[in-house]
Amino acid sequence: MENTALILIDLQNDYFGSFEGAKWQLNETEKAASNALKILTKFREKNMKIVHVRHEFAIENPPFFAPNTQGAKIHDTLTPKENESQILKHNVNAFKDTKLKEILDNSNITNVIIVGAMSYMCIDAVTRAASDFGYKCFVAHDACTTSDVEFNSIKVEAAIAHAAFMAALQFAYAKVETTNEILELL
């Protein structure tokens, strides 16, 4: 696939149960990160465009991803290399108030592969925005993760929340594939 970029969203320490002091552990983050690393490795081998997105809250006493903390750093297994683009965001949508679109357009990107966290927040937001901007979107569902969520006293387990959002994205915004299926496309 020509003109393709990998966008890694918020794979930061605070989401990893294996990170001591994690402030917002997600469901099976290590497994999702391991799959994201497989795709990242293939992109590096093929010298394709890579964009790492990192979130820091711009509020007092954030629940996680506090500026200048170890928890807000990208997990060691996915550390960006010098030639890879990095975006710092303060919103759910990685396009909002960042140079993400400019970076993609300057590299003539037409396809984006999206991995990371959280499925029902930042992955959903960036995929819908990318689709609205005209990029052909691919989401590696097993390289994404989330947490339990609750609404109106109804608790939704992480696996169900993840599946619901992947189904919605697949319906109208992206091809939702496994890591292995994504690797075959490359």
Image (spheres, rainbow, N blue to C red):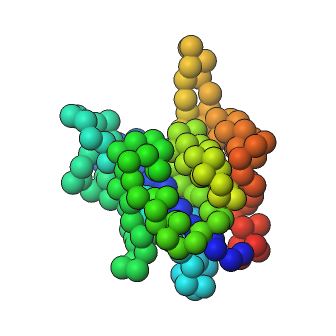
Q: Quadrant of residue 165?
A: top right
The residue shown at (62%, 63%) is 112
User: Residue 7, percent across and down?
Assistant: 53, 62
The quarter in which the N terminus is drawn is bottom right
Q: Position of residue 13 (x, y in %)?
A: 37, 55
Looking at the rendering, which quadrant does residue 137 occupy?
A: bottom right
Can residue 21 be seen from the camera position used here?
Answer: yes
Front position in the image: 103 or 175: 103
Name above or below for residue 181 compared with residue 61: below
From this viewpoint, is residue 38 visible? Answer: no
Q: How many marks?
A: 0
Q: Please state if 21 lies on the left or on the right of 18 as rendered.
A: left
Q: Quadrant of residue 47?
A: bottom right
- Image position, residue 172 (x, y; %): 76, 43
Residue at image position (36%, 79%) is 82
Give the percent coordinates (x, y) of residue 65. 32, 46
Q: In percent of the image, x 53 and y 39: which residue is there?
A: 121
Residue drawn where x is 62% and y is 27% of the image? 156
Between 47 and 35, the one lying in front of the other is 47
2 to the left or right of 124? right
Is 17 drawn above or below residue 102 in the view shown? above
Using the image, determine if residue 44 lies above or below residue 61: below
Q: Quadrant location of the C terminus?
A: bottom right
Q: Between residue 181 and residue 15, name the one nearer to us.
A: 181
